[in-house]
Image (cartoon, grey):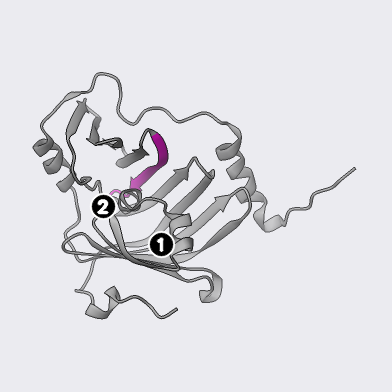
Amino acid sequence: MRRIHIDRLLVGPYIALGGLVGCGGAPGPVIPLGATPAPVAEAVAWTAAGRMEPPVLHRFRWLYRDRAQSLGGRGSARIATGDSLRFDISGPLGSGRGAAFVAGDSAVWAEPEEDVRKLVPNYPLLWAMLGVARMPSAVTEAARYEDAKLTAWRLVSGADTVEFARLAGPPLRLVAEVRQAGERIGRVETVFAEDGTLKSSRLDIPRAPARLDLTYVSSGRTQPFAPDIWLRPEP
């Protein structure tokens, strides 16, 4: 009989991942049935509302799991005006560093690019993990659903779709799902604390399958950032 040994420190993550890779079923829809067409301008106003005024600094612990590995460490996200975002992660004792400078929904640079892309395959999903429902570019259609506890939007850009839902709670939650050419790229659920700061966020990546969890240590406004944080780090 073949025997497989799993490090005791990884038993918890592997059991949790079993729920992700074993069930096989897709989660329920972000936007319920009954959504109706709405002006794109109203979607722009909705996505802009509720943002924390920059500059903002978030610090978090992160845990990434897929079929092959479980990795974790600490990280930070700095948000400045103009939808500029600096995202940094590192493993235990500073190992496994990665960083990205994101402008809007695309990367200006990422280092190392392959590792950053593995953690976050889509930058609108990264914004959602930071509590921001960012309006996609070139939206041609919008649909809205609203009731006493939920406001949800479907935003269509050609063959791509982004859906957002804000649930009143408690706790207040932001859910986002991105599809490209009909394929589900990922789904985010971000939870806010009572004071409106970030508490936790989870990204599920069905293609891998994989999961990224962020647990926020601190979250709030800060002093303006030094200009050199936007420079690509040395390899």
x, y (%) of residue 69?
62, 55
- The residue identified by callout 2 is 195
The magenta segment = 183-196
x, y (%) of residue 137?
20, 46
x, y (%) of residue 124?
31, 49
How crowded pointer 2 is (Cα within 10 Å; few <14, some 14-19, many 20+) is rated as: few
Q: Which one is nearer the viewer's eye here, 140 or 147?
A: 140
Q: Residue at x 52, y 68 (%)?
A: 91
Res 143 quadrant in image: top left
How crowded pointer 1 is (Cα within 10 Å; few <14, some 14-19, many 20+) is rated as: many
**Left or right of residue 62: residue 163:** left
From the image, give the main secondary structure of the stretch colored magenta: strand
Which structural element holds mark 1?
strand
> Which callout, 2 or 1, points at the residue further toward the start of the chain?
1
Looking at the rendered structure, the kind of residue marked 2 is Asp
Marker count (numbered): 2
Which structural element holds mark 2?
loop
**Left or right of residue 116: residue 96:** right
Res 187 quadrant in image: top left
Q: Which mark is residue 60?
A: 1
Q: Which one is nearer the viewer's eye here, 190 or 136?
A: 136
3D distance between C-alphas at marks 2 and 1? 17 Å
Select label 2 or label 1 by which is in front.
1
Looking at the rendered structure, the kind of residue marked 1 is Phe
